[in-house]
Amino acid sequence: MANIIIPPALAAFDSLPDSALIDVKVVSGVFGCSENTAWRRYGALAIKVSPQQTRWRVADVRQALAALNQ
C-alpha cells in the first residue's frame, strides 16, 4: 500500500485562521476532489499573490463548504 502524505495545512485546516492562505492541494483535499476539479469549481475564489502563485483564503473555502451543506 502506498504511503499517503497529507499536507500540514490540510491536517490543520480546522485550526487555521480565516485570513490564512492555502494552495490548490489543500483545497482539493478539503473538497475531496482532484486539483483540476478544484480549479474548475473554485478557481473564481482564488487570489493571485504573485505571477506564479495562486492561493485561496480559508474563509472563502469555509463559505464554499457551508454552501454545500445547505
Image (cartoon, rainbow, N blue to C red):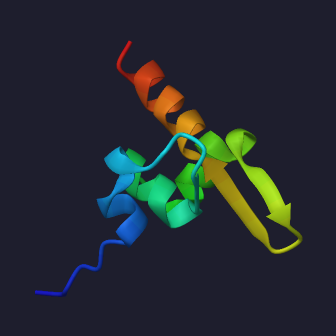
Specify the farthest residue to the bottom: 2
Residue sitting at x 49%, y 45%: 17
| Left or right: residue 62 compared with residue 5 | right
In the rendering, at what x and y percent does residue 59 appear?
55, 36
Residue sitting at x 52%, y 27%: 63
Where 65 falls versus 53 (above or below)?
A: above
Quarter location, residue 10: bottom left
Q: Nearer the viewer, residue 3 or 51?
A: 51
Residue sitting at x 43%, y 31%: 65
| Left or right: residue 51 compared with residue 38 | right
Specify the farthest residue to the right: 51
Q: Which part of the image, by quadrant, shows the N terminus?
A: bottom left
In the rendering, at what x and y percent does residue 66 appear?
42, 23
Where 43 falls versus 35 (above or below)?
A: above
Where 36 falls versus 41 (above or below)?
A: below
Quarter location, residue 55: bottom right
Q: Nearer the viewer, residue 33 or 10?
A: 10
Q: Which part of the image, by quadrant, shows the C terminus?
A: top left
| Left or right: residue 1 compared with residue 39 | left
Specify the farthest residue to the left: 1
